Structures are given as C-alpha cells and as structure tokens.
Image: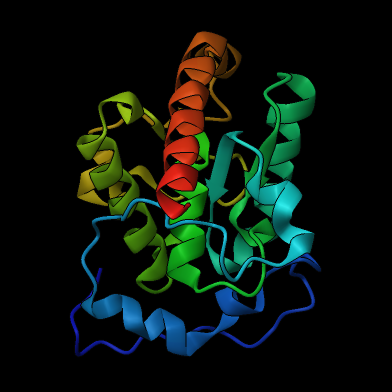
Amino acid sequence: MGSTNSKPTLSPDSSKKAKNVSTGQRDSKQVNELCGLSAEIREPASRSSGVCSSNENIEGVFYKFVILHAENDVDEAIRIQNLLQNKFCIKPGIIFAEMPCGKHILENLSDAVNDSAWTIILLTENFLNGPWCEFQSYTCLVNALNKQHKYNSVIPVRPVNNPLPREKIPFALQAINALEEDSPGFAKQVERIFQESTYRQQREIWRRERMKEKLEHF
C-alpha cells in the first residue's frame, strides 16, 4: 500500500476514459492520502446526507459485481463488464469508474465493495502502476475476512488483454485462484463462482443493513 513517505501520482485526464469517470477518482491529492490509511474498510455511512438526487438510482441497487481496475483500464473493465452481463447474464454489474461523482474516493470504494456481492480485481500490467490498485485489493480482502457473508467474494481476473504476469501478482492475491479469461475452463469457473443463491443471500443482508441505517438515522 506504500508508506506515508511515498508520493503516488495520477496521470492527467485522458481522452480514453469513460465519460462518467468521477473527477474524485482522478484527484491525485486524494490518492496521496491513501498512503497513510489502514486497509480496513468501514461500514457505509448513512446515505441520507450529501447525496445528489441524480445518484439515487445507482445507490439503491445491490450489484452482482463491481470491477476494481487501474486508472488506464477503464475500457478493459467495461469489456469484462459487458462479457459477464451479456454472455453469462450476470447482471447488474458496475465498474469503479461508474461510481457516483461528488464523493471522496474512499467513500466510493466503501460503497463499491459493500453494495455488490462480488468484487472483481482486474489484474493487468497497469495494476502495479502506483499504490491505488493494491490498496483496493487489500481493502477488499480485509473486508472479506471481517464479514462472514463476504467470504470468497474477492475474484481476481486476468483478462486476455495485457494480463499481469502471474509472478507479479501481489502475495496477498496469490492465495486466491484467479479467473483466467484465456483458460478453456473459464466459462465453467464463472458459472461456479457467481451463484444466484449467494447473490440473494448477500442482497438480503444488504437490505437489512440499509434498513437498520435508516432506523438509526431517524
């Protein structure tokens, strides 16, 4: 994740990014703050304050998966998103670049992990460019360890395009068998992992947590 003395930077806005990439996700100052933070993710705070009405539909959905990706991998993340949704009917899904604007990058990360059944980590060569991606992955792993219903919910994926070499995969992720898109057994692995019963169980827990938040707020 980097020490407090490291100074990660993000590249300027790129024309290759999806139009709906949050400006907060491109804010290098916010990413610098990650270096001194723990990987432990917090429970999502009440969404009743500071939420734009335009984001209500996004925040009211419990996704089947969220794809965490490097800044330069938006197009590849969208491709994997479309593959899972259109070929395997695993929907709805979202990529991190589609998270609502106007929020702190860490709040978006918390929402992404807590508001989805599975967290996909896109392992490309860009994954190791800066500390942000490793921070994402460690955060998801700690979250999965702290919550019983999130067990086995972190899914590393090595896509066919620009995959991260196996020997470069961070140690914490090596313990998890990554989905290999170019593997002959890819389709069967996807069907085995993304079980509808698991999604429904997690969605019910998510609904109860949201209801509890609302009651505590009032």
With respect to residue 100, does 32 lie above or below?
Answer: below
**Residue at x-position 29% and y-position 31%:** 176
**Residue at x-position 51% and y-position 30%:** 207
Apparent side of residue 34 relative to residue 186 in the rendered image (left or right): left
Apparent side of residue 90 relative to residue 200 in the rendered image (left or right): right
- Here the colouring is rainbow
Q: Position of residue 201 (x, y in %)?
A: 46, 16
Apparent side of residue 126 relative to residue 140 in the rendered image (left or right): right
With respect to residue 85, does 22 lie above or below?
Answer: below
Q: Position of residue 169 (x, y in %)?
A: 32, 49
From the viewer's side, name the closer residue of 213 and 74.
213
**Residue at x-position 61% and y-position 35%:** 63
With respect to residue 80, does 20 lie above or below?
Answer: below
Q: Quadrant of the N terminus?
A: bottom left
Which residue is at the far front? 218
From the viewer's side, name the closer residue of 78 and 103.
103
From the viewer's side, name the closer residue of 56 and 68.
56
